[in-house]
Image: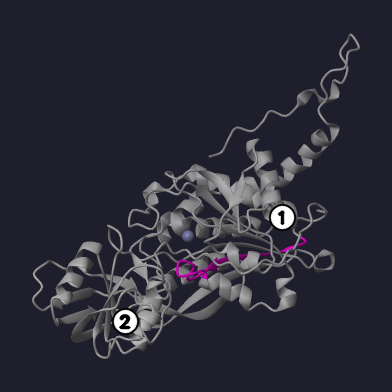
Amino acid sequence: MKKPALKMALAASLTFSAFGTQAVLAKPSEAVQSQPYKVFDNKVINEINVDNIYNNIDYLAKVPRVAGTEAEYNAVQFIKSEFESYGYGVDIQEFTFTGYTPPSSMELTVDGFEGELNPSSFTYTPSGDVTGELVLAGLGKKEELADIDLTGKIALIKRGEITFGEKVLNATATGAAGVIIYNNADGAVNGTLGEAREDYAPAIALTKAEGEALAAHVQSGTVSASLKVEGAVTEERTSHNVIATKKPTNKKKANNDVIVVGAHHDSVELAPGANDDASGTATTLELARVLKNVPTDTEIRFITFGAEELGLIGSTHYVDNLPEDELNRIIANFNLDMVGSKDAGDLVMMTADGEPNLVTELAQESSKRLNGEATPYAQGGRSDHVPFAEAGIPAALFIHDPVEPWYHTPEDTIDKISKEKLQDVAEIVGTAVYDKARFDNTGTKAKKVKKEKNIELYHNKDVK
Ligand SMILES: [Zn+2]
């Protein structure tokens, strides 16, 4: 939310009272600097039309935009045509990734077992229809399986110590045709095998109560079981990044720097993603429109990334495919992800290492000028600023914290969007970018530090 601007110190020139006592001085430099800044900031602020942002969110958030689907591709085409309507040349960067569709149904039947079984799936389990002897296989560790013949059988494994993926791989390597993993605590397993592979047997999850009852049943004698997973698909899919470039206004006076302003246009399954992240996408579009014709000595790239929700795939592809000298030109990445929810908390900037950088410094200065208070920063990964940060580029995620209850749900819709929040973020980011990109700015210099790889994916599933 925008906070009221501080009153400017009007009394700066009244340095002495009639009685010769010294009055409180406003620092002259502040008074001198505030004037041109106001002019620069207003060049951006006066052009922002929050209805453009809102209407583009409304358009994009009609349907979920899962990476690799036709809906995501339609969004890509819409974003491209919007950029073009502002006068940009647009590059579409295509990339492929391994996509996964979860099972449509799962079935487990066990001979002679009376209780009810409600299996759930693991992300990346393949489909399959297997029948075989049900065998207790402990925690599924290699050393436990060494003496058990699992060939053509279904392994019943308890959760714990090693990952779900390792358990399934260990069992499959010793010949298991199917795997059941049951919980070691109350509640459902919301699990993933971690990555798509060809050498998994079909795997399902059971609750602790179900698993323990099955284990007791198996101990009573030889038991046959049938396990059926249907509709799961692992395949190569295609997604796209959309890149609109604003070249420096005057080639001779240009520097070699590039600022990247970006957001992701994909959403998760079933979620129309109004806030996550049509809000960031539409704000990126509006900033591209606003900044199109303002003179700058710095290149600005407006990029919407695909397949963020599946593990920052589009932004990672973009960064990984830049030659070293091109990468070195990028001095800042402003990443807008979830910037318009009525029901989320206050604006915060997240950096991968929790340290301030050029992006947070520029935005703290602009937010202080606009709102009288600097937007705080904190440590946070899980979005498209991470690949930039790992390449040593100053990068920050703009997000409202805590996130709204509708995050990653079908309720993430246009009616939850706040124009005030969109306006606030567009102003802070737009003026911060312009502050650095305009001519004659000798201000804050970028500091580049190589970071260790530390990918925190936008997943919230258990692997262990
Ligand atoms: Zn997001």
Any part of residue 223 in sight: yes
What range of the chain is rendered magenta? Answer: 297-312
Left or right for 45, reference 401: right
Give the secondary structure at mark 2: loop
Displayed quadrant of residue 463: bottom left
Give the secondary structure at mark 1: helix
| Ligand 1 contact, mark 1 (Cβ < 8 Å) | no
303 falls in the magenta region: yes
Please name the amino acid that badge 1 sits on.
Leu
In depth, the one of 423 and 104 nearer the eye is 104
In depth, the one of 98 and 159 nearer the eye is 159
In depth, the one of 333 and 47 nearer the eye is 333
Residue at x 26% of width, y 82% of height? 178
The tag on residue 358 is 1
Circle 2 residue = 126
Q: Residues within 10 Å of mark 2 (few under 14, many from 20)?
A: many
Q: Position of residue 347 (x, y in %)?
A: 55, 45
